[in-house]
Amino acid sequence: MTRIAKRQNAVKSSESQRHISQAGEILTSLIVPVIRLEGYFSRAGETIAAAGGQTLARWLVLETVGEAPATVAHIARGLGYTRQSVQRVADLLSQDGLTQYAANPAHQRSQLVRITPLGRSTLSSIQRAQRIWADRVGSEIGKAELLKASAVVDNLTRILQAEQQTH
């Protein structure tokens, strides 16, 4: 027990606290709430996707190929998922007739995932449910606050992506 307490004190020592800026402290205080928020967004996404009889993962893949066909690798990179997990979802969507695989003129071995008319109809149902949810939740926060939050999220995403690419 004493050993754990010493390790915790070492992690939270006043020495390490002195070297963090005010901006660093504020960013640190955001980490847990943002992770918690991601959980709320995921649960809301599952509920919204259910309006079309889908899961959040399936909705995200449909949304990605809703505008233009894409390879599984491209979808995975865009969503930050593994290629294997997106492949599994894409296969299920194809089996259900919501997407289909098509030849990729740019790469013989990497097929394109293309939305079908049934997939587009399903996606439209989900998007309607999402708009209702977004209007309800967004109206409680307000446009100005949401624009500020969006700018902060965009900046953090850009910085963290650049940092991951250099490490």
Image (spheres, grey):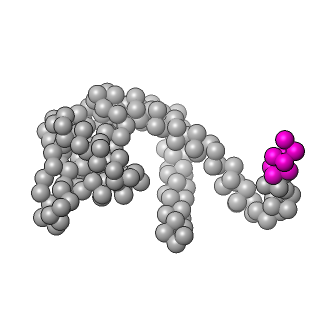
Asked if residue 14 lies in the magenta stretch, the reply is no
In the image, 78 versus 144, the foreground residue is 78
Q: Does the rendering let one see residue 12? A: no
Q: Residue at x 70, y 60 (%)?
A: 23
Where in the figure is residue 33, as x and y percent of width and height? 62, 42
Where in the figure is residue 37, as x and y percent of width and height? 55, 40
Looking at the figure, which quarter contains the N terminus? Answer: top right
Where in the figure is residue 22, as x and y percent of width and height? 75, 60
In the image, 133 versus 59, the foreground residue is 59
Describe residue 36's horizontal placement relative to residue 120 as left or right: right
Q: Residue at x 23, y 43 (%)?
A: 91
Q: Residue at x 48, y 38 (%)?
A: 41
Where in the figure is residue 148, as x and y percent of width and height? 54, 52
Q: Is residue 129 above or below residue 28?
A: above
Looking at the figure, which quarter contains the C terminus? Answer: bottom right
Give the overall secondary structure of the magenta segment: helix
Describe residue 102's horizontal placement relative to residue 124 as left or right: left
Q: Does the rendering let one see residue 152? A: yes
> Which span of residues is magenta-colored?
1-8
